[in-house]
Image (tube, helix red, strand yellow):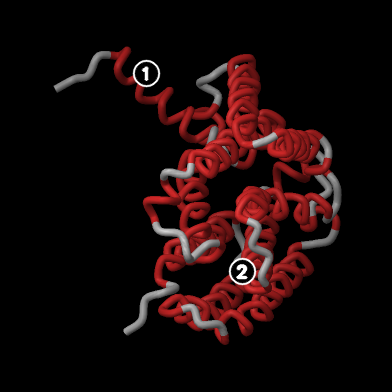
Amino acid sequence: MFFPRSFKQNILKSLSLFSIVRGYNIIILIIAQYLTAKYILAPELNWVKLILDFKFFCIVIASALTSSAGYIINNFYDAAKDQINRPQKYVLENLFSRKLQLLLYILLNMFALIFASVISFHAILFFLFYIFAIWIYSNTIKRLFWLSNLFSAILMIFPFWGITLYIKNFETIIFYHATYLFFLILARDIIKDLENLKGDWVHRYNTLPVVFNVRITKSIIILSVLLCFIPNYYLIKEPLGLMQYYFKSGVPFLIIVLIFLWYSKDQKAYLYIHNLIKFWILAGVLSIGLIYQNF
């Protein structure tokens, strides 16, 4: 059975759009915000009350829309180097013209601010700052030595700061979780620089592998992951139910990943390691629901 050409084109464009806005990441972000709110920030809330909290819903949707817009503008500025680093991905994501991508970027941010306006004027300012920070990162900071990786990791955890401010829970355990996630994301971001070394070098991005070399960059990644073990130590001591096994198993898992990283030499291997850390972050998100579960 053959599908009409128009049907195939629509499927491709849908996949293109999903790729441009990093649909997978946005779905995980939404799930992570609800799980974080329920099991870490406000464990006294039941699911019904949380789901029916319209203002919290608006924060989550505004975060998702702003992050989606951020992926679009980041893709827009990275198009040239993606032609070198990820040619197949570049072809897929550019089924939409750059003009349409910019239009979608503006619309997503506008809708994000509309949802933020339901919450408060301070929420509008929060998301305006987030939108500007993403743009300045994509346009300028991404090319700057070292600062780009730190800024990227901060932007990734910024939506969680939004729900923390809304719920107003600033206990130490929140800091431990945020710090663990920050260093994992930082390591993943630097690994992406190893993947993109060729394109970054051609287009003069001052990333760690370009400024230094691969060996020093790997040492910095190892340091970032080892720094995860500091909050990991304190989190294991907290009453986190079955989630404590996530942090306990994280030590040998991440050490094995680092050993593999040290002996890796090509883009394919770096992509595999990148995906391993993404898997571990996803496992952490899903294990949040195990905090109050015990054998």
The crowding category of the residue bearing disc 2, from other C-alpha atoms within 10 Å (few below 14, some 14 to 19, many at least 20), is: some
Name the residue: 62% across, 84% down: 233
Q: Mark 2 points at which residue?
A: 177
Secondary structure under badge 1? Answer: helix
| Residue 121 image label | none
The kind of residue on which mark 2 rests is His
**Relative to 131, is 30 on the left or the right?**
left
Residue type at tag 1: Gln
Residue 46, by quadrant, is: bottom left
Residue at image position (79%, 68%) is 216
Question: As rendered, which of 24 and 175 lies closer to the eye?
Answer: 175
Residue 149, visible in the rendered structure: yes
On screen, residue 236 above or below 105: below
Of label 1 and label 2, which has the lower sequence position? 1
Residue 255 locus on image (x, y percent)? 58, 79
**Residue closest to the eye, 25 or 233:** 233
Give me the residue at 83% from left, 37% from top.
140
Crowd class of label 1 (few under 14; some 14 to 19; many from 20; radius 10 Å): few
Task: Assign a secondary structure to mark 2.
Answer: helix
How far is the residue under mark 1 from the one under mark 2? 43 Å
- Give the percent coordinates (x, y) of residue 10: 36, 19
Residue behind mark 1: 9
Question: Nearer the viewer's eye, disc 1 or disc 2?
Answer: 2
Query: Which image quarter is the N terminus in?
Result: top left
